[in-house]
Image (tube, coloured by chain):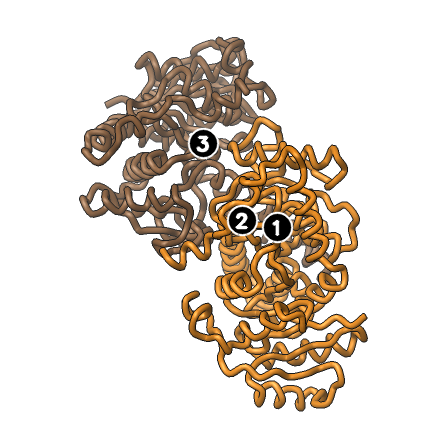
Chain colours: A brown, B orange
Amino acid sequence: MTIKISIDCMGGDHGPAVTIPAAVSFVNSEPEAELILVGLESAIRAELKKHKAADHPRLSVLNATEVVTMDDPLEVALRRKKDSSMRVAINLVKDGRAHACVSAGNTGALMAVSRYVLKTIPGVDRPALCALIPNQKDAPTYMLDLGANVDCEAQHLHQFALMGAVLVSALEGKAKPTIGLLNVGEEDIKGNDVVKQTAALLRADHEKDLLNFHGNVEGNDIFEGTTDIVVCDGFVGNVVLKASEGLGRFVKKVLTTEFKRNPLNMLGALIATGAIKAISRRMNPSRYNGASLLGLRGLVFKSHGGENAYGYEWAIKRAFDAAKYDVISRISKSIAELMSQPETDPAAAGGSGVNDLTQQKSA
Amino acid sequence: MTIKISIDCMGGDHGPAVTIPAAVSFVNSEPEAELILVGLESAIRAELKKHKAADHPRLSVLNATEVVTMDDPLEVALRRKKDSSMRVAINLVKDGRAHACVSAGNTGALMAVSRYVLKTIPGVDRPALCALIPNQKDAPTYMLDLGANVDCEAQHLHQFALMGAVLVSALEGKAKPTIGLLNVGEEDIKGNDVVKQTAALLRADHEKDLLNFHGNVEGNDIFEGTTDIVVCDGFVGNVVLKASEGLGRFVKKVLTTEFKRNPLNMLGALIATGAIKAISRRMNPSRYNGASLLGLRGLVFKSHGGENAYGYEWAIKRAFDAAKYDVISRISKSIAELMSQPETDPAAAGGSGVNDLTQQKSA
């Protein structure tokens, strides 16, 4: 079976200089993959030539005349740049011409355009962003939501857990990945009402063997790798992620200062440089690149904006694996089952269909 | 003027072996301080003798026969151990025999007992825990709330900001410390309703020159030191703090592994040990020890459980400075002014008087 992936070649800090070599390398390593390269045709063809892939039978080019920049307001990405590489790549998924899309563009724009073009899966009113966080077990912790939904009810967190479990099954080959609910303590009595209600929903699913609920986890468990998946609302997820990035930069600065203070100054500097590189690699590994926008009627993967070709290829690989495993159908099935359960209030589960990104845009 | 501080000598991992040398050192360095040492009299007197302070004129001993352990449920600390060193030390504040109390005991128990004994300041229905987080500017970021209040409304976050500003004025000597509101972006349109409402309240205060509101800050700003104070609800605060601790342990592990991998093996190990110690000192400095329980009718300071005497002395110093600056009267005045403002809804500001710790206890 051929899996077709549309690539927003213009997104990210480096554009075709990163996306094209990544695409070429991936298509050469994966015989079932076919990639549609979307963006400024001349720039893409020049890069393809450079990588000796101008006539690759499983690489095609689709011209798109505009580019969504990192500074473009959502408004511009959504309403004006209708021929952007991002929009055209997502349209391919909508039209059934691609199974998944990969972009390194602006996260807010990608979420807004994907949501607008693809719409959500019936029963899902809030798509979530799920990224891979490195942990002490040298494995990824899948964490969602990371910023799209700042006000969540229990049924949203419940859906995030279900969608995350389907994704992790696809990408990690785990039949029943463990799910942790982010809280201020492990005990059932801890936390706010939304978290307590979510825990009750997840426990009920666990008892029916629908998923593998570990229970509450705390902030440290993200990095300890206690569970495969950590579920939280987008406010908490965003703050934790950015705090971790800030702490990372702080550590880097302290390391540099401390080593430069070493009496064997040159040696200290040398060791510091090596150590910082090694730590950066472990803390922010390129092989964990490729966050997923879950809950849409199509697969969209987000690469870090500054990622290199090796990392970008990992995002393509994740999109490929998710498509091959048919994550959308599995999530749809899982959500439909959830909605058909007698104890679920369909009105509550259905919700308003308006997510926070959209609300913010018009605020 | 003499400032009297009651010391829970039994709290923390080390008890009198840490608390007594800290108390002796502090009282010798601060002629206006008088310390009341609370706990098992024989153990305290033995330590005092060891530190040549058995007859110090400004050190007195008050016997308390029980100790709240780290594993004691709140119930036990609150209802059963009525002669614990923690409870007796807090009682001294209530009875006006001490201006402030310091304890390295169990945080949950300390908050519950303090709240039960001291009660809250009129208008404050949720006391907050405010700790010092090291930042890149080599200064502390004061962050609150850190775990006591998992469901906050805008008026609670508003009060946290006011109380934090009074505390930082006292401890850092800054007339108008800057206040940041933790959010998922800097723009006004970002965040959930509670955060947006809080920002509106803080902006109004800023315009009246009642406080110095910087605006929204993001997770990374905590460690960048963008503002003197970061305000958030206790759920987010707790998760961020624990995630940071988890990331810190992860960094430590990676550092050790990477240096041991160094071909100059012995040298690598040596450098790693030194570097990790230096980094730990910078990331978790003893001089930032001493979190404050704000919003009560008395000053209570919490030392880390594992802190050494140098760090514990810093917690005593913070309690002393807060008492000398009369933080309680200033907070009371600030909250009273807030409640007298026509635009504040007194019913909403008054609230139920029940905080989450108490709710959890009886859940």
Q: Which of the 4 image quadrants contains residue B350?
A: top right
The residue depicted at 77 percent of the width and 78 percent of the height is: B28
The chain that hosts pointer 3 is: A
As shown in the figure, which amino acid type bears the numbered disc 2? Answer: Gly
Q: Is A37 positioned to the left or the right of B129 in the image? A: left
Q: Is residue A149 above or below residue B255?
A: above
Q: Is B337 positioned to the left or the right of A190 in the image? A: right
Residue A232 appearing in the image: yes
The residue depicted at 56 percent of the width and 54 percent of the height is: B127
* B218 or B52, nearer to the observer: B52
Mark 1 falls on what kind of element?
Answer: strand
Q: Which residue is mark 2?
A: B237
Q: Position of residue A44 (x, y in %)?
A: 50, 16
* A307 or B324, nearer to the observer: B324
As shown in the figure, which amino acid type bears the numbered disc 3? Answer: Asn
Mark 3 falls on what kind of element?
Answer: loop
Q: Quadrant for the C terminus of chain A, please.
A: top right
The residue depicted at 69 percent of the width and 77 percent of the height is: B35
Q: Quadrant for the N terminus of chain A, please.
A: top left
Mark 2 falls on what kind of element?
Answer: helix
Q: Is residue A247 above or below residue A268?
A: above
* A276 or B351, nearer to the observer: B351
The residue depicted at 59 percent of the width and 64 percent of the height is: B302
Q: Position of residue A253 (x, y in %)?
A: 66, 50
Q: Which residue is mark 1?
A: B143
Q: Position of residue A228 (x, y in %)?
A: 35, 46
Whether labels 2 and 3 belong to a single chain: the reply is no
As shown in the figure, which amino acid type bears the numbered disc 1? Answer: Met
* B257 or B264, nearer to the observer: B257
Q: Is residue B177 above or below residue B92?
A: above
- Say which mark, if any, is on residue A149: 3
